[in-house]
Image: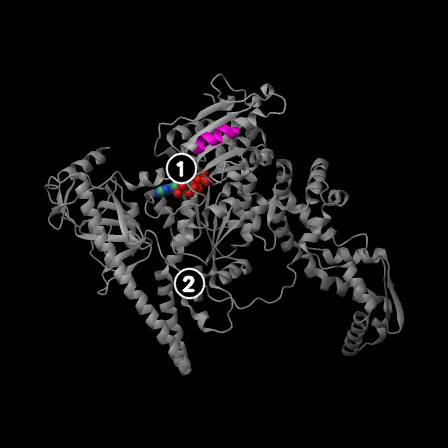
Amino acid sequence: MAAQAQQETAVGSVHGETHDSVRDREIGIEQVHLDQVYRRLEEKIHEAEFLMNDAAKRGQVGTPGALAERDAQVFRAGVHLNRLNNEFEDFLFGRIDLLRGKDGKKGPDGAYTAVEPAEGAVREDNTADIAETLHIGRIGVLDQDYSPLVIDWRAPAAAPFYRSTPVDPGRVVRRRVIRSKGRRVLGVEDDLMRPELTAFLDGERLPVIGDGALMAALGQARSHTMRDIVASIQAEQDLVIRAPAASVTYVEGGPGTGKTAVALHRAAYLLYQDRRRYAGGILIVSPTPLLVAYTEGVLPSLGEEGQVAIRAIGSLVDGAEATLYDSPAVARAKGSYRMLKVLRKAARGALETKDTPTRLRVVAFGRRLELEADRLERIRNNALGGTAPVNLLRPRARKLLLDALWEQSGAAGRHSDPELAAELRSSFDEDVTSEDSFIGFLDAWWPELAPRSVLAAMADERRLGRWARRILNPGEVRRVARSLGRDGLSVHDVAMLDELEAVLGAPVRPRKRRELDPLDQLTGLEELMPVREETQRERAERLAQERTEYAHVIVDEAQDLTPMQWRMVGRRGRHATWTIVGDPAQSSWSDPDEAAEARDEALGTRPRRRFQLTVNYRNPAEIAELAAKVLALAMPGSVSPSAVRSTGVEPRFVATNQAQGAAGRNPLAETVREEAARLLDRVDGTVGVVVAMNRREEARRWLAGLGDRVVALGSLEAKGLEYDATVVVSPAEIADESPAGLRVLYVALTRATQQLTVVSAGRDEPDEAGVPDLLRD
Ligand SMILES: Nc1ncnc2c1ncn2[C@@H]1O[C@H](COP(=O)(O)OP(=O)(O)OP(=O)(O)O)[C@@H](O)[C@H]1O
C-alpha cells in the first residue's frame, strides 16, 4: 500500500501532466523501442536467409571442408531463422531500470550482471540516477553494436526482473511489464522497488504507471489452455525456475502456488542454460491427459518445442494408453509395492499354461531320448533361479535341457580326450536343436512372454490367486482379476505393464534409426537432405516416443504417484537430474509413506534441494478460506498458502433434497445445471463442475447443451486444472470415495479463480444456509 501511494505521488509529480498523458507518453517510449527491436529482427531474418542460401550453394562444391563449413553455417542460420520466424504475441514484455552496479562487468549477453548497487549509486539526499535500462523478452536480441536490445528472460541479467522485491530490491528501481500485441504496445504496468528513492532517468523524474502487472494477469479469464507467466514470475518462483539442474530439486506448495507453471518454465530455462545437455530430452510427467492438454501450449509459447515430452502418467509406456479408472480398492492393490511381488511371480508362473507340453521327445545320434514332466519341472525351476528377466533365461533353460538329454544319451563317457569330447557334444547339440520337435517344444515350453499376455493371464482369478498367495487377500484377488478382464487399461495397469517389461526383459526390437541431435531440427539441415520425409514436428514426436530415458525428469503432482508408478518413472531417469513438484495435502494416494519410500528409491542418493512456494495465485481469499477448513480435516496442522487477492464474492451454497423431487425428476441434476448456467452468466471464461468419480457420466448429461465453456469432471480428473468458476457437487460423496477422499475434496475446492458454488445432497447434511457438514466451522 505504501508503495502504491508513492507510485501515485511519483506519477502526479511528473510536470503536472495527467495520469493518462503520462501513460500515453510511456507507451510511446516503449513503442519506439519495440519498433527498433522488430527492425533488428527483420535484419537478422534477412541475414539468416542469406546464410542459408549461401550454405546451400557451398554444399554443391562438395569438398569435405566446404561441407563441414556448410553444416556449421546452416546450423547457426537455422537456429536464428526458426526462433525469429516464430510470431510471439508479446515478444517483449518487461523492462527494468537499474542503479549503477557494483562490479560493472558485462555478461555474455552484453548486460551488466552486478546485482547490488555500487557505492554512491544512491546519493545522501535519497536521489539517484538510472544507470542502465534493460528490456526483457522471450529471446535475446543484440543491436548491430552488440548492445542488448532485448535480454532473454532466462539470461542471468534478466533475473533481477523476477527476483527484485521492495524488501530486497538490488539495483532495480522500477520494474515494468509491457503488454503488446504483434508490433503494437498496448499498455505498461509498473512496480516501484525503491519507493523511498527519487530517481531520475535522463535528467527527468522516473514515472510509475498502473497497479502492478501480477493482479492484471491473475484477474484474466481462464480458457481451456494455460498461459505462460513469463511476464509476472514471482521471486520465490524464480528461485525454483533458475535453481541449478544438478541432482534433485524438490518443490512443495499448496494449490495455486504455481507449481505446474514453475515446472514448465523450468524446462524452458534448463534448455536455454544447456541445450546440448538436454538434447537428451526432458520428460514432464503429468497426472492426467486433461492436464497435458491444458499445459502443452506453454512451452511452444516460450519458444521451446521438441526436446520436451509432456506425457500423462498413463501414457508413459509406448502403445499403452490408459482410458479406464480403477475403484479405490483395486487401485490400492495395483499401485502398492505388494503388486511388485505378485508381478514377479506372475511373470514366472505365466510360462506355464494349460498347453504347456509335459514331455520332450527327440532323436539324437540315432537314439530316442525323452524327458518326463518331473524332470522338466526341475529344469524349469533350476533355470528360473535368481532374479534375471524371464525372457532372457530362455537360452539358459535350453542349455539345461540339452545337458539333461546329453546325460541321458550316454555319449558323455565316449571320449577321454577333452577336445574330442567337446566336439562330440557340440555336434550332439546341433543334432538336437535342428530337430523340429525340439524347436516346437521349446517355443511351447518356454514361450517369449509379452507384458500384455502376462497381464491377461492375471485376469484368471484362480491363477492370480496362486501368484498372489499371502500377498493380496481373496477379495483383492477377485477384484483385481475382474478389473484386468475389462477391455482397455487403467493408469495402474500401465505401471504394471512397465514393471512386467522389466521383469520379463524387453522383447527384441527392430533396431532404432540413428537418433539425431534434436538441435538438428533447428538447423534446417534436414531440408537439404533428400532422405527426410517427416515434418519437424513429426520427427520430434517420433524421437520423443522412441526415447526411453531422459536427461531431466520433471514430475508434476508428484504426491499422487503410487510406488509402482515411481518405479516406472524412475526407470526413465536413471541417469537424469530431477525436478519434483507436489503438495502432500492434495495426495489421492492412500499410503504416502510407502510412496515416499518408492520415490526415494527412484531418486537414489542424489542430494535434494528443497523449495517451498507459499502464495496462492489462483483462488481468491474467499475460496481459499473455505478450502482451508477441509485442509484442517485432511491434514491437521498444515498451513494453507496465502491467497494473493480477494474478489469480495463469497462461495455460494445450495442444498438439494433428492426425496422432494417429483416422479421422473432429478433435483440434484436440475440444481447443478441451474448453478452452472448461473456461473456461465457471471464469468467470461470456463466453468468446471466437479463430481464424485462414479457420477462423471451422468454429470455430463446434466450439462448437455450448455456449451463448451462448461465441463463435467470426476474428482480425480480435476487435478491440476482450473476454471473461472466451479460447482463442487456433494462434498460428502467426494470425501467418502476413498481413504484419501478429504484430500481429493481439497483439490476440488481449490480449482476456481473467481467463483465457487457448493451443491449439497442429503448425505452432506446441509444446515439451513445450505452449508454442508464438512464445510462448517
Ligand atoms: N507469477 C505468476 N503470475 C501470473 N500468474 C501466475 C503466477 N504464478 C501462478 N500463476 C497462475 O496461478 C494459477 C495456478 O498455477 P499452477 O496451476 O501452476 O499452480 P499449482 O501450484 O500447480 O496448483 P495445483 O497444486 O492446485 O495444481 C495458474 O493460472 C497460473 O498461471
Name the quadrant of the N terminus: top left
Cα separation, mark 2 vs mark 1, equals 43 Å
Q: Residue at x 44, y 59 (%)?
A: 278
Residue 673 is covered by the magenta coloring: yes
Q: Amino acid at mark 2?
A: Arg
Give the label, 2 or 1, closer to the camera.
1
Seen from the viewer's position, the closer of residues 632 and 248 is 632
Q: Position of residue 253 (x, y in %)?
A: 42, 39
Q: Quadrant of residue 650?
A: top left
Q: Position of residue 196 (x, y in %)?
A: 17, 38
Seen from the viewer's position, the closer of residues 264 and 301 is 301
Q: Which residues are magenta?
A: 672-680
To which residue does mark 2 refer? 276
Q: Quadrant of residue 365?
A: bottom right
Seen from the viewer's position, the closer of residues 704 and 88 is 704
To which residue does mark 1 refer? 684
